[in-house]
Amino acid sequence: MRYSAPALGRVAGCLGQAAPVPNSQHRLRVDTAAPILPAPSLNDPATGYRWTLSTAGQIGAKARVLTYEGSGHTVYGRSACTVGAVDRYLISRSVPADGVRCLEVRPS
């Protein structure tokens, strides 16, 4: 599964639109002193992993990607690794080292 059905419906809804798109795609312009922590899963059915990498690349040095090597649309709560990293980020703005990955934890 590459994209979710609801997402395809929203994307296809603008096909053939007569007027120009009012908010067309563009490179991100992020101006922040705070670090940003995108936290994707490798097998997210709704938002592709490459999209996160592209977003982080556009943000630049302030973005650190925390990769969960499993499935699902959200990563918080999937493992002690993801919970710990996100909690540290939210509480103290501490970001993990670049390229940190959390192993998949299968439900028992």
Image (cartoon, rainbow, N blue to C red):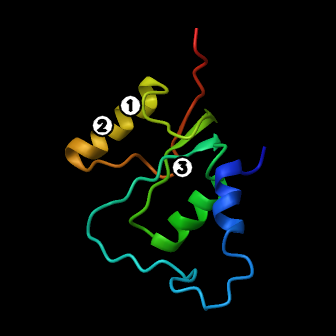
Quick one: SS at disc 1? helix
Q: Earlier in the sequence, mark 1 or mark 3?
A: 1
The reply to whether callout 2 and callout 1 are in contact (CB within 8 Å) is: yes
**Residue 61 in the image, given as x and y percentages of width and height:** 43, 68
Quarter holding the N terminus? Answer: top right
Amino acid type indicated by mark 2: Asp
Relative vertical location of residue 89 with respect to residue 105 in this rendering, above or below: below
Near-viewer residue (18 or 96): 18
Q: Residue at x 48, y 47 (%)?
A: 39
On the image, numbered disc 2 is attached to which residue?
Answer: 87
Task: Indicate which disc residue 26 carries.
Answer: none
Label 3 environment density (alpha carbons within 10 Å; few <14, some 14–19, many ≥20): few
Mark 1 or 3, closer to the camera: 1
**Residue 58 in the image, given as x and y percentages of width and height:** 52, 73
Q: Residue at x 51, y 64 (%)?
A: 56
Q: Residue at x 65, y 56 (%)?
A: 7
Rendered image quadrant of residue 81? top left
On the image, numbered disc 3 is attached to which residue?
Answer: 99
Is residue 1 rendered to the left or right of residue 94?
right
Q: Earlier in the sequence, mark 3 or mark 2?
A: 2
Q: CA distance from mark 3 to mark 2?
A: 18 Å
Quick one: SS at disc 2? helix
Q: CA distance from mark 1 to mark 3?
A: 17 Å
Rendered image quadrant of residue 90? top left
Q: CA distance from mark 2 to mark 1?
A: 6 Å
Q: Residue at x 49, y 36 (%)?
A: 75
Near-viewer residue (80 or 46): 46
On the image, numbered disc 1 is attached to which residue?
Answer: 83
Amino acid type indicated by mark 1: Val
Quick one: SS at disc 3? loop
Rendered image quadrant of residue 14? bottom right
